[in-house]
């Protein structure tokens, strides 16, 4: 039976340690079952359970395996309360001489220790060698380039060295002679003159200031003709061209009337209470920013679901920039248009004039967006 069990365990490619880890039974007990050795077990009452569990693990018949084990080992199962089923204390000699199936390192079921060189692949060694070589080449190249940059070369110049052959008053005595004051040799002991000191701090270029004509048109203005207080004492032409009181007001009124006539000749644009109401509303949270024609931000926030913003009525239509454009719709006099875009896309420079909305967007499809249908239902209920 032990050979059959070892063959089944070899078929499963399991070692004694694998069986111990999976069945939670000591490897020494598994080896004792395969060798039909009951002296290894400390508690005879557990032998039947160990044999049956191991036979069931190998896919064998537990009852047949236990009968064969009892026949080959001479084991007789006893009642749990009988003295033979209790733990039997073995003598020290027997305990010392009992063979340990895991003590032999050459056993087939004991895993062999792996060497440190088994985990090294030749391909990895070659790759590391190539990497080390590349790093070394790059380092040597950088070091060589740094040496070339720091190198200083001296180029010969064809210039003769000037030598002062004769020194002035070289033969004259330096110290005092016969009570006279000490003489200065080549002017080395004389203090610098005032002119030399002045020249040191004032370059020659600043001797004569350089004047550059600037603001040419300003120099041509006549203070008698222009300014806040022109001199009208000797000029009758200025008095003739002076505006009379109220002339500026009359000119402003004439220009306003002319502009009104020019506007009436073209298309008529209605602003005020009669202009159509344009509103922006969101069926899902969306970020919107409304700017006027001159770039001023009129409204910017995240519209929550069901929140709307009514546009102010101005001469130039504002523009819209929004994120999550598939959730933003327009309402022109209570009629829904849109959406402003597809899905979670971002759209910009959307003109919010009523005509532009009519031309650019179709009437909103309530059946295509359930949130839009809920919004319209809530709005109708509130009205």
Image (tube, grey):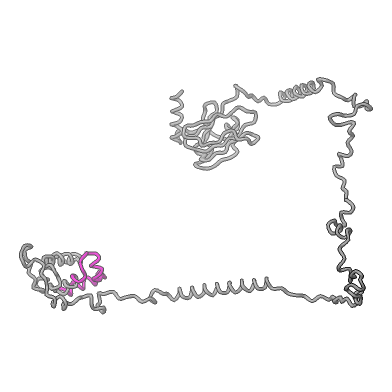
Judging depth in this view, the residue of 52 and 220 nearest the camera is: 220
In the image, farthest residue toward the front: 179
Q: Which residues are magenta?
A: 1-29
| Residue 353 on the magenta span | no
- Name the residue located 71 percent from the left edge and 23 percent from the top edge: 264
- Indicate the position of residue 82 as horizontal and vertical percent values: 5, 64
- Indicate the position of residue 117 as horizontal and vertical percent values: 39, 77
- Indicate the position of residue 9 as horizontal and vertical percent values: 22, 70
- Name the residue located 11 percent from the left edge and 67 percent from the top edge: 87
Q: Mostly what secondary structure, the magenta segment?
A: helix
Looking at the image, can residue 68 be seen?
no
- Indicate the position of residue 236 as horizontal and vertical percent values: 93, 25
Looking at the image, can residue 253 be seen?
yes
- Name the residue located 67 percent from the left edge and 73 percent from the top edge: 148
Compared across the picture, whether 144 is left or right of 250 comes to left
Compared across the picture, whether 215 is left or right of 374 comes to right
């Amino acid at each position: 039976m032990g050979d059959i069990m070892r063959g089944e365990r070899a078929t499963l490619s399991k070692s004694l340690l694998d069986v111990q880890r999976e069945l939670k039974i000591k490897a020494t007990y598994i080896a004792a079952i395969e060798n039909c050795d009951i002296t290894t077990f400390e508690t005879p009452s557990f032998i039947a359970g160990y044999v049956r569990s191991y036979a069931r693990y190998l896919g064998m018949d537990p009852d047949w395996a236990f009968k064969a084990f009892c026949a080959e080992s001479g084991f007789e199962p006893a009642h749990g309360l009988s003295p033979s089923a209790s733990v039997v204390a073995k003598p020290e000699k027997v305990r010392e001489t009992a063979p340990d199936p895991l003590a032999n390192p050459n056993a087939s079921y004991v895993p062999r220790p792996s060497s440190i060189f088994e985990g090294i692949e030749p391909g990895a060694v070659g790759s590391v060698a190539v990497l080390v070589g590349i790093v070394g080449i790059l380092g040597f190249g950088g070091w060589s380039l740094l040496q070339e940059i720091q190198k200083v070369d001296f180029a010969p110049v064809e210039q003769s060295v000037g030598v002062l052959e004769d020194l002035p008053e070289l033969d004259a005595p330096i110290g005092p002679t016969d009570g006279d004051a000490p003489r200065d040799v080549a002017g080395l002991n004389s203090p610098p003159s005032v002119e030399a000191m002045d020249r040191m701090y004032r370059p020659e270029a600043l001797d004569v200031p350089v004047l550059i004509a600037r603001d040419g048109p300003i120099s041509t203005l006549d203070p008698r003709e222009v300014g806040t207080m022109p001199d009208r004492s000797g000029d009758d032409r200025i008095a003739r061209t002076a505006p009379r009181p109220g002339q500026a007001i009359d000119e402003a009124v004439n220009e306003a009337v002319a502009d009104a006539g020019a506007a009436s000749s073209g298309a008529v644009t209605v602003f005020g209470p009669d202009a159509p109401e344009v509103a922006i509303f969101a069926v899902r949270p969306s970020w919107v920013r409304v700017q006027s024609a001159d770039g001023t931000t009129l409204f910017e926030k995240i519209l929550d679901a069901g929140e709307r913003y009514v546009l102010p009525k101005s001469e130039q239509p504002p523009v819209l920039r929004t994120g999550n454009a598939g959730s933003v719709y327009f309402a022109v006099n209570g009629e829904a248009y849109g959406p402003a875009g597809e899905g979670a896309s971002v759209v910009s420079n959307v003109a919010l004039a009523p005509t532009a909305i009519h031309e650019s967007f179709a009437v909103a499809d309530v059946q295509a967006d359930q949130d839009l249908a809920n919004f319209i239902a809530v709005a109708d209920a509130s009205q």
